[in-house]
Image: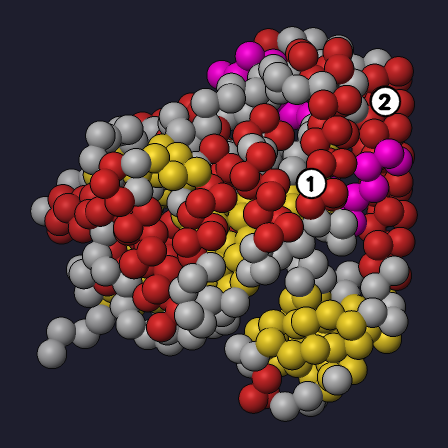
């Protein structure tokens, strides 16, 4: 028998990259690769990169530099770069790091087996096209190995919004939605392998418009309701959404679909209409606040999460105060906040930035407010009964950890047989990043 080759995959960034890494590993499985947890003995190292964070490309080059001793010790070691930095940098990666053998963009990783063949012939392989074919249709069927109780499922990719700060339209391409039948088959397969909760993924997931049976176009709400009919699938979530695509039927689903969890990540980015216009967000603070009110009318116990950028070019203190005011009005149970950093090729990259010290000060003030709201939401869970899907043992002996309906991490004392089970828990304690409870 041929000895399996070892593949080490390091994943950066969003949940979609986690999903993509799983699919790439499966594609490379057809070439005899099995995954390993360490690069030290790998036959191939693959970095699945993200371009959202500041200086993303430089961090990738730095990481590649750390693998040089491994390549020197093993000249047959293959090194590849995938994902959004690969898409943005292309041939530049191979020019700056000649030891890189393979560069593949997020829309072409279904071609990895053919690229591996080119490496075997002694060449290098680069593919950053935006092909017409559906990559998911060309990937190998997932292995039938058991899965954990939660899983991601990419239903939509790309974005047509062209926010002034964002590279996604350039690295992931235009909005594309996967057909309903393929998503149903993949979801049913995941459930058959032990998955109880699926999170639908998309750069702009609530813009989903996939082809349903007979060619009719389905929106996300219809897809959710159909997925809810799958026996054994107990929970459904989706991320990330745009306020302009929260249609009436999707809002209604929060109230009438029991399997859709009461958690929504809906980025607003700023509370200033002037800055929102400069960002090309195409919504206002008022329309966002009204939208949140409608969603909470449908699901009063909804926990809301959001994204914020401070220090965007042209932002004044008055604009920042509007953001703080929006946070106070809306009340977020969870949020992510960032200091603006330019992304080459985006419209905002050419604009004069805000003073660095001022931007840092604003970020600290915003994060302090968001942390206060988040802690208040967590503390408000004490005494409540919630359902928890248990995923794994905790750090302490005899402890199990899972997620509540509201995506809070919850730990209890209990047996490992809880793994994959949904059980009622009474919350008794709130700490910085988790809740403690007692099984009921």
Q: Is residue 194 left or right of residue 340?
A: left
Mark 2 lies on residue = 322
> Could you say where residue 126 lies in the image, as x and y percent from the top left?
25, 35
Q: Is residue 322 magenta?
A: no
Bin the neighbour count of mark 1 within 10 Å (Cα to Cα): few under 14, some 14-19, many 20 and up.
many
Depicted 373 relative to depicted 95: above or below = below
**Residue shown at the point (60%, 43%) measured from the top left:** 252
Depicted 130 relative to depicted 113: above or below = above
> Could you say where residue 53 lies in the image, as x and y percent from the top left?
59, 35
CA gap, disc 2 to disc 1? 22 Å
Looking at the image, how many numbered discs can be counted on the residues?
2
Q: Quadrant of residue 313?
A: top right
> Could you say where residue 76 lies in the image, as x and y percent from the top left?
23, 56
Bin the neighbour count of mark 2 within 10 Å (Cα to Cα): few under 14, some 14-19, many 20 and up.
some
Residue 396 visible in image: no
- Which marked residue is nearer to the observer: mark 2 or mark 1? 1
**Residue shown at the point (87%, 68%) measured from the top left:** 382
Q: Which residues are magenta?
A: 328-348
Q: Quadrant of residue 230?
A: bottom left
Mark 1 lies on residue = 295
């Amino acid at each position: 028998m041929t000895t399996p080759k070892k593949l080490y995959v390091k994943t950066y960034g969003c949940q979609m990259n986690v999903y993509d890494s799983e699919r790439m590993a499966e594609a490379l499985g057809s070439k005899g690769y099995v995954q390993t947890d360490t690069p030290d003995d790998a036959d191939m190292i693959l970095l699945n990169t993200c371009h959202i964070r500041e200086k993303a490309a430089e961090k990738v080059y730095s990481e590649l530099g750390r693998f040089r001793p491994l390549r020197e010790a093993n000249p047959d070691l293959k090194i590849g770069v995938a994902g959004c930095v690969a898409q943005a940098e292309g041939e530049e990666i191979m020019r700056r790091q000649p030891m890189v053998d393979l560069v593949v963009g997020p829309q072409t990783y279904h071609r990895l087996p053919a690229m591996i063949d080119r490496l075997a012939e002694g060449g290098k392989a680069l593919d950053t096209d935006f092909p017409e074919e559906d990559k998911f249709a060309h990937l190998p069927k997932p292995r039938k190995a058991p899965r954990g109780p939660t899983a991601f499922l990419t239903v939509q990719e790309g974005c047509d919004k062209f926010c002034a700060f964002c590279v996604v339209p350039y690295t992931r391409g235009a909005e594309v939605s996967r057909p309903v039948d393929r998503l149903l088959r993949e979801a049913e397969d995941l459930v058959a392998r032990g998955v109880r909760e699926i999170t639908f993924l998309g750069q702009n997931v609530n813009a989903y418009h996939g082809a349903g049976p007979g060619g009719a176009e389905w929106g996300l709400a219809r897809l959710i309701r159909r997925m809810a009919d799958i026996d054994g699938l107990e929970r459904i979530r989706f991320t990330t959404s745009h306020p302009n695509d929260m249609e009436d039927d999707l809002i209604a689903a929060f109230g009438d679909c029991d399997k859709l969890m009461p958690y929504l990540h809906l980025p607003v980015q700023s509370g200033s209409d002037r800055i929102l216009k400069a960002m090309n967000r195409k919504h206002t603070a008022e329309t966002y606040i009204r939208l949140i009110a409608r969603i909470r009318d449908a699901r009063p116990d909804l926990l809301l999460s959001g994204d914020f950028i401070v220090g965007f070019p042209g932002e004044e203190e008055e604009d920042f105060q509007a953001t703080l005011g929006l946070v106070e009005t809306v009340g977020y149970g969870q949020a992510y906040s960032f200091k603006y950093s330019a992304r080459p090729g985006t419209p905002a990259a050419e604009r004069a930035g805000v003073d660095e010290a001022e931007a840092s000060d604003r970020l600290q003030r915003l994060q302090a407010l968001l942390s206060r709201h988040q802690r208040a939401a967590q503390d408000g869970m004490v005494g409540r009964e919630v359902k928890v899907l248990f995923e794994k043992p905790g750090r302490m002996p005899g402890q199990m950890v899972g997620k509540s309906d509201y995506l809070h991490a919850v730990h209890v004392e209990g047996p490992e047989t809880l793994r994959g089970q949904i059980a009622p828990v009474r919350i008794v304690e709130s700490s910085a990043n988790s809740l403690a409870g007692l099984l009921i």
